[in-house]
Image (cartoon, grey):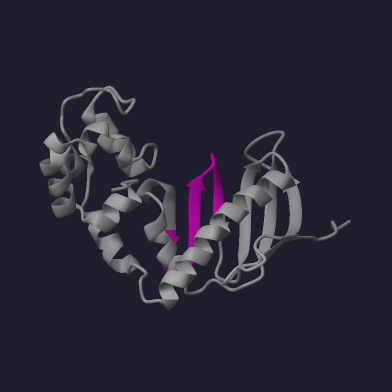
Amino acid sequence: MEMEELEYDLFEDGVLVKKVVIKNIKPCIISEGQISVLMELDSELHHVLPLLMAKFPPGKVNYLEKKNVITLSIYERLITIYPSGKVSMNKTNTKEESIEIIKEITAIINETHVEHKEGKSVDYRLIKEKLSKIGPLSIYSCLPQTDCEECGEKTCMAFAMKLLSGECKLNECMLLHEMGYMNNVKCLKSTVGIQIMEILGWKS
């Protein structure tokens, strides 16, 4: 027997997405005791999905250009978003939890839509090209290289690797906020660019 669809209001004044409908809930096949949720947003997302690539760390996002489908590895689960507005989410505990998470994601979607309308969105092709040329060594060369462990990692190289996987944020390198390390910040701006620094979690 098919379940009754459940509609939720996300944003009363959402510029693109306002509501979501839970279409189906099934046991998660990869995580016992959890569920997989199929949802549908109330707007199509064709123009937004490529731009979302610039909103998440490279290790947390996978964009299939031919199908215009994006998969996010966030909140310890996989969330796949389709141009029609369909969303699948696995490893979820409750339907309420899925609504909390999709609300956070749709806030980013709405923000990205506004940036696109105002001509402020980032060209994902440029970001993709830049990211393909950046490795841990590129970032490490610009870090303080003191292995101070203030970021929570034992070495600056470990920190650089986790930056690209999305497991930590550039802002967590405390030394980069000190005057004595301004040249390191300039090095990062020159090497990866301010847009990618922001994707990696930098806040001025």
Image coordinates of residue 10 in percent, x first then y, are 67, 60
Image coordinates of residue 113 in percent, x first then y, are 48, 70
Position of residue 26 relative to residue 93, above or below, is below
Q: Residue furthest front?
A: 179
Q: Indicate left or right for 183 with 38 as reference.
A: left
Q: Indicate left or right for 74 with 126 as reference.
A: right
Q: Main secondary structure of the magenta part?
A: strand
The reply to whether the magenta stretch includes residue 75 is: yes
Q: Nearer the viewer, residue 31 or 114?
A: 114
Identify the residue shown where x is 28% and y is 48%. 204
Number of dots carrying numbers = 0
Q: Indicate left or right for 22 with 151 as reference.
A: right
Residue 20 at least partly seen: yes
In the image, which residues are magenta?
63-79
Q: Indicate left or right for 20 with 190 as reference.
A: right
Q: Quadrant of residue 177?
A: top left
Identify the residue shown where x is 20% and y is 42%. 139
Image coordinates of residue 78 in percent, x first then y, are 55, 47
Identify the residue shown where x is 74% and y is 58%. 22
Q: Quadrant of residue 141?
A: top left
Q: Residue furthest right?
A: 1
The reply to whether the magenta stretch includes residue 84 is: no
Quarter of the image that includes the N terminus: bottom right
Residue 66 at least partly seen: no
